[in-house]
Amino acid sequence: RTALAASCAAVTSVLSGFPFDSIKTRMQTHHYNSLMECVKITYMEEGARGFFRGMIPPLITVSAIKSVSFSIYEGTKHRLRRYPGLDGQTLGSLTALASISGASSGAFIAILSCPLELIKIQRQLEQMIAKERGLPAVSSSSYNAAKQIVQKKGVFGLWSGLRCHSIRETMGTSIYFGTYETVKRALSGNRPDAKSSPMTHFMAGGMCGVLSWLIVFPVDLIKSRLQKQVMMDDPKFKTIRSCA
């Protein structure tokens, strides 16, 4: 039931949030004076399609990835409860339990999601990258983007930026689940056996999402810039440190 709910939420999130993710990627990798300027230029140059470029792979795979993520999270929680201080009965032990379990889930999922994230960024920025190189703007596909990366970098080129991506996923998922479980317990009167209302889940989900992104956003910025240049012969940034 948890995996099914996670899958439905993930699909809804991709459909509603992808245009914002596309704008985020563009603003991270190119200079705009404001959010609205980015939106206007994107629409003028690429039309409405520009906001949804590269959406198909995450839309197709997000259900499976989120199902695996939640399954690993729940499984890790179950195994860790036997250890002292991680039984989840107190608020502190619940925070530690959820954070460690979330980190384990994020670290594993990063391996699966890195190629998808790389292809998505290449698709989101393909028109802008072509313009920078003085090439004609030709609409591609996610398959062609993946094929070009493999031809230039080999199969393991699809995992370019894995280190930074893993840091983002491990930190972000740890903070996400740790905050979610903590806020949900606190809003339920700090009672382990209390049933949470839909509003409690809504508030906890909103707070954990905001907090996790506030903390990992700098890492996400570096990841986007590193993955943008995967097809460049002479990339400007060769390491995380040089990009930071």
Image (cartoon, grey):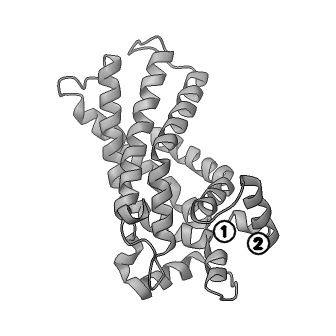
Q: Can you give x and y, in whole percent of width and height, for residue 240 in the image? A: 37, 63
- Given residues 106 and 30, the one toward you in this image is 30
Q: Earlier in the sequence, mark 1 or mark 2?
A: 2
Q: Are marks 1 and 2 in contact (CB under 8 Å)?
A: yes
Instruction: Give me the residue at 45% from left, 86% from top.
Output: 233
Residue 1 seen in the current view: no
Instruction: Give me the residue at 50% from left, 48% from top.
Output: 217
The kind of residue tagged 1 is Arg
The kind of residue tagged 2 is Glu
Pointer 1: what residue?
Answer: 53
Quote the CA–CA distance across marks 1 and 2.
10 Å
Q: Can you give x and y, in whole percent of width and height, for residue 180 in the image? A: 46, 30
Label 1 Cα crowd, 10 Å radius (few <14 / some 14-19 / many 20+):
many
Q: Is residue 6 left or right of residue 31?
A: left
Mark seen at residue 183: none
Label 2 Cα crowd, 10 Å radius (few <14 / some 14-19 / many 20+):
some
Pointer 2: what residue?
Answer: 46
Q: Is residue 111 shown above or below 215?
A: below
**Quadrant in which the C terminus is drawn:** bottom left
Q: Is residue 88 left or right of residue 131?
A: left
- Given residues 159 and 108, the one toward you in this image is 159
Q: Secondary structure at mark 1?
A: loop
Residue 95 seen in the current view: yes
Instruction: Give me the residue at 48% from left, 82% from top.
Output: 232
